[in-house]
Amino acid sequence: MANYTVKAIMKNFEEMLIEMPFSKVTVSALVERCEISSNTFYYHFRDIYELLNAWLTVKEKKYINIADGIPDWPESLKLVLKVMQENSKLVYHVSDSIPKDRLEFFIFGWAQERFYEVAKKRIGNAAVSESFTRKLAGFYCYSALGFVLNFLWNRMKMNVDESVDQLSGIFYGVTDYMIAKETGALNQKENKKAE
């Protein structure tokens, strides 16, 4: 029964978030919609903010699992951004109400280890330090965070495929340059040009 009740609360909460900003969602309206008592709600959640946190955690896990199932990071980012576009009202009603550090934490949580693996793969057998690899992965994370925030600020009105392809081209171009610089290959090319 408890699992069913929590699912019903979450489902109705999400429907309300599509209809209105989080700041307009009240426990009294939610329990009326769910046809439960306020005591039942408070048995499962301390307050509306705890419900929001639980709902966000469920959504984060769902989309991280989907994205992790796609080995190519540009394709997984495209998928997440397209889902955001399809659910734009919900995204804005939630993103306008949650602390920005929560959004940033979600992006970093998804991106940090994934981009570390991308950096390692791109570096291949090049002789670079672990510190260099981590810095490169950090560059990817900060760039992805800025990209997603810009996507939100511009009301998600971009061609996702085209924009992510451009971003990945920049990532790989910067990566190749930085690897060449780190390994000394860039100096060798410059010396050959000078001769």
Image: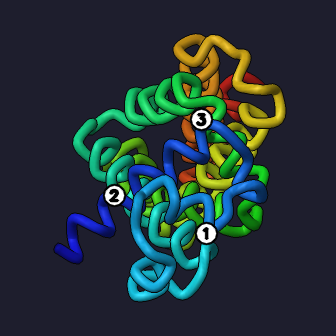
Q: Is residue 105 above or below residue 69?
A: below
Q: Position of residue 81 (x, y in %)?
A: 54, 30
In contact (CB < 8 Å): disc 2 and disc 1: no
> How dense is the environment of label 1, judged by Cα within 10 Å: few (below 14), some, or many (20 and up)?
some
Q: Is residue 188 above or below residue 57?
A: above
Q: CA distance from mark 1 to mark 3?
A: 45 Å
Q: Position of residue 186 (x, y in %)?
A: 64, 39
Of labels 1 and 3, the one closer to you: 1
Specify which label sits upstream in the sequence, 2 or 3: 2
Between residue 22 and residue 83, name the one nearer to us: 22
Identify residue type, mark 1: Val
Residue 119 left/right relative to 85: left
Between residue 193 and residue 117, name the one nearer to us: 117
Between residue 11 and residue 181, name the one nearer to us: 11
**Residue at the spot x=64%, y=37% of the render?**
19
Q: Quadrant of residue 178?
A: top right
Residue 8, label in figure: 2
**Residue at the spot x=53%, y=14% of the render?**
161
Identify residue type, mark 2: Ala
Which residue in the structure is indicated by mark 3?
171
Which residue in the structure is indicated by mark 1?
27
Specify which label sits upstream in the sequence, 2 or 1: 2
**Residue at the spot x=41%, y=42% of the render?**
122
> How dense is the environment of label 2, judged by Cα within 10 Å: few (below 14), some, or many (20 and up)?
some
Q: Which element type, helix, strand or loop, lies under badge 2?
A: helix
Q: Position of residue 179 (x, y in %)?
A: 55, 46
Query: Is residue 111 among the parts visible in the rendering?
Result: yes
